[in-house]
Image (cartoon, grey):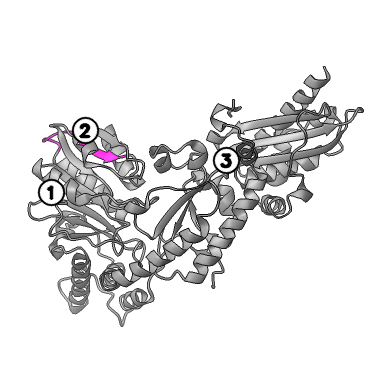
């Protein structure tokens, strides 16, 4: 299958790097490394275990951690669940208050909702207008009963970066467990867990050219962080997570993270250039708004709102380009992006946001082509838009009495 | 969103050839023109329909502009095709269900056809209020 659609949705998932796929293939067949890493009684198990431990080291190396601090999971969603529910339930005797932000991924927000049902109290912080959670804001909401703070490193919709170093210093001083969802960070920003005072960090394989269905949770050893496990059944992963380890997935994630460590700099240099070209080409579109800010975001994500156009129609018009819309019109609910809402964007901008995300295999030609197409369809859709007419006529949309449905 | 071919075709026709597909404006102050605008930016759709009516109460022209998802734009065009040449009495009988069925709208997009029916009613009411 050859895709004619240009893929600009790398923040959603990345293709597996061919070098990763090769390593994975070696762990599937009878003449390959297919054994159960937990089998201690024969060579098949030993070889599989060796491959798993090598991958654990590769993951640990990218983030400068000890490989014994890496726990395999099924993905960042499970890592977030294990970190948040596991820490809250283990430390519940110390307090019942948890702080997170309104713009976390659902894999953080939904476990928090679950903990609320179990009697925990959760504070959901507002971001600033750039999508950043400030330490001041955290400090204002900390209480004696605060046991856990969960703040993402890079926001998946905006690319906004939080200062986890500064937050970590504060949480350590105050003996609060600090969890960071770093699903979007690996291979995008350097992470040094030997310096960061982060206790728990979630990683995903498939956001960094590894396979789907595999992730990891970093669990700090010094000072030691403890968790109540979610899955029981054999005591794998030092009791943190039971279940037979999927050697091929793990080897894939290990290889992907090894490549990320080696190629992060060159990848990011290229992506930054592409992102600058893209913005140069599209920024002369009238009434375009960047969601987030250039001074504090990663270059692989560009989230923009084209005022007076609804996001889903824009995605439909950009038919040969795969992008994602903050407007969840694409899913079953008809709500605009909760992330953009939290930034305080008015509804018509929240409804019109598009996330363009680039990656390792994006080319200059693709960037230029998509920019030209975007310009064309924005113009076409505005010609259909009564709101654009009203804007040109100088009507203040805030003052119109709308007939709500 | 997985749409029917009909929705995609109507959306693309409108996008690529707006003049041929009744996108535009009529003079809202003319006594022969009724305007109906429904929806809200907060909900993600706004539909504006204008009808031009002659002395025999027949709709001789209509124009629209729609802010909204692909199915809102397709529903607008579907509505326009159904309105042309109809008398006001006939137009009043157009139901959202008909539009939804003709376009095979997915159930979470039914509100697009509801919006279309409402805009017809509002445009006719506006025209009739000018006559009265």
Q: Pointer 3: what residue?
A: B108
What's the chain of the residue with tag 3? B
Q: Do the residues labelled 3 and 2 touch (CB within 8 Å)?
A: no
Residue under the image location 22 percent in, 60 percent down: A191
Q: Which chain carries label 1?
A: A
Q: Residue A373 carries which label?
A: none
Could you classify mark 1 by the number of other residues whose Cα lies within 10 Å: few (under 14), some (14-19), or many (20 or more)? many
Q: Is residue A288 above or below residue A140?
A: below
Please tell me which of labels 1 and 2 falls first in the chain: 2
Instruction: Please provide percent x and percent y for residue A383.
Output: 67, 47
Distance of label 3 from label 2 (alpha carbons): 39 Å
Label disc, if present, on residue A141 of the rendered structure: 2
Q: Which residue is drawn at 44% across and 39% down?
A: A345
Q: Where is residue A106 in the image (x, y as percent from the top left)?
A: 36, 45
Which residue is farthest right?
A: B56
Secondary structure under badge 2? helix
Which segment is the magenta one?
Answer: A92-101
Question: In the image, residue B25 lies at what x, y percent?
Answer: 74, 39
Residue marked by disc 1: A226
Closer to the camera, B83 or B100?
B83
Question: Would you say B87 lies left or right of A255 here?
Answer: right
Residue A97 colored in magenta in the image:
yes
Quadrant of the image containing the N terminus of chain A: bottom right
Residue B98 visible in the displayed image = yes
Q: In the image as oriented, which residue stretches furthest toward the top?
A: B132
């Amino acid at each position: 299958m050859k895709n004619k659609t240009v893929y600009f949705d790398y923040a959603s998932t990345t293709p597996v790097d061919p070098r990763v796929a090769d390593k994975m293939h070696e762990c599937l067949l009878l003449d390959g490394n297919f054994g159960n890493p937990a089998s201690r009684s024969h060579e098949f198990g030993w070889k599989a275990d060796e491959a798993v431990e090598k991958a654990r080291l590769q993951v640990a190396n990218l983030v400068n951690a000890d490989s014994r601090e890496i726990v395999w999971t099924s993905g960042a969603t499970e890592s977030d669940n294990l970190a948040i529910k596991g820490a809250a339930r283990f430390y519940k005797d110390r307090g019942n208050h948890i702080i997170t932000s309104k713009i976390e991924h659902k894999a953080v927000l939904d476990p928090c909702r679950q903990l609320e049902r179990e009697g925990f109290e959760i504070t959901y912080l507002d971001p600033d207008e750039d999508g950043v959670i400030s330490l001041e804001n955290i400090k204002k909401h900390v209480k004696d009963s605060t046991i856990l703070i969960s703040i993402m490193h890079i926001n998946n919709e905006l690319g906004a970066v939080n200062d986890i170093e500064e937050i970590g210093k504060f949480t350590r001083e105050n003996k609060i467990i600090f969890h960071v969802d770093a699903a979007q960070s690996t291979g995008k920003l350097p992470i040094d867990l030997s310096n960061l005072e982060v206790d728990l960090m979630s990683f995903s394989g498939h956001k960094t050219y590894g396979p789907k269905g595999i992730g990891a949770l970093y669990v700090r050893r010094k000072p030691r962080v403890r968790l109540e496990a979610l899955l029981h059944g054999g005591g794998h992963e030092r009791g943190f997570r039971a279940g037979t380890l999927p050697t091929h997935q793990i080897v894939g994630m290990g290889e992907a993270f090894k490549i990320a460590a080696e190629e992060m700099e060159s990848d990011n240099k290229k992506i930054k250039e592409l992102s600058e070209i893209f913005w140069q080409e599209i920024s002369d579109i009238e009434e375009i708004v960047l969601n987030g800010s250039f001074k504090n975001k990663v270059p692989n994500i560009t989230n923009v709102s084209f005022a007076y156009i609804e996001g889903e129609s824009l995605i439909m018009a950009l038919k040969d380009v795969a992008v994602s819309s903050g407007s969840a019109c694409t899913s079953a609910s008809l709500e605009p992006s909760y992330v953009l809402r939290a930034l305080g964007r008015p509804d018509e901008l929240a409804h019109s946001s598009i996330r363009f995300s680039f990656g390792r295999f994006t080319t200059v030609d693709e960037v230029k082509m998509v920019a030209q197409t975007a310009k064309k369809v924005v113009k076409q859709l505005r010609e259909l838009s009564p709101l654009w007419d009203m804007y040109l006529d100088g009507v203040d949309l805030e003052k119109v009495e709308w007939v709500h449905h | 969103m997985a749409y029917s071919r009909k929705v995609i075709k109507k959306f693309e026709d409108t996008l690529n050839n707006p003049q041929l597909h009744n996108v535009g404006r009529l003079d809202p102050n003319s006594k022969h023109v009724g305007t109906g605008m429904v929806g809200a930016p907060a909900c993600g759709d706004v539909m504006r329909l204008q009808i031009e009516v002659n002395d025999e109460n027949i709709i001789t022209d209509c124009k629209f502009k729609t802010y909204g998802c692909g199915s809102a734009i397709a529903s607008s065009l579907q509505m326009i095709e159904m309105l042309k040449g109809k008398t006001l009495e006939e137009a009043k009988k157009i139901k959202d269900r008909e539009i939804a069925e003709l376009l095979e709208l997915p159930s979470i997009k039914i509100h697009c056809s509801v919006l279309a029916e409402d805009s017809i009613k509002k445009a006719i009411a506006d025209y009739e209020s000018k006559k009265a």
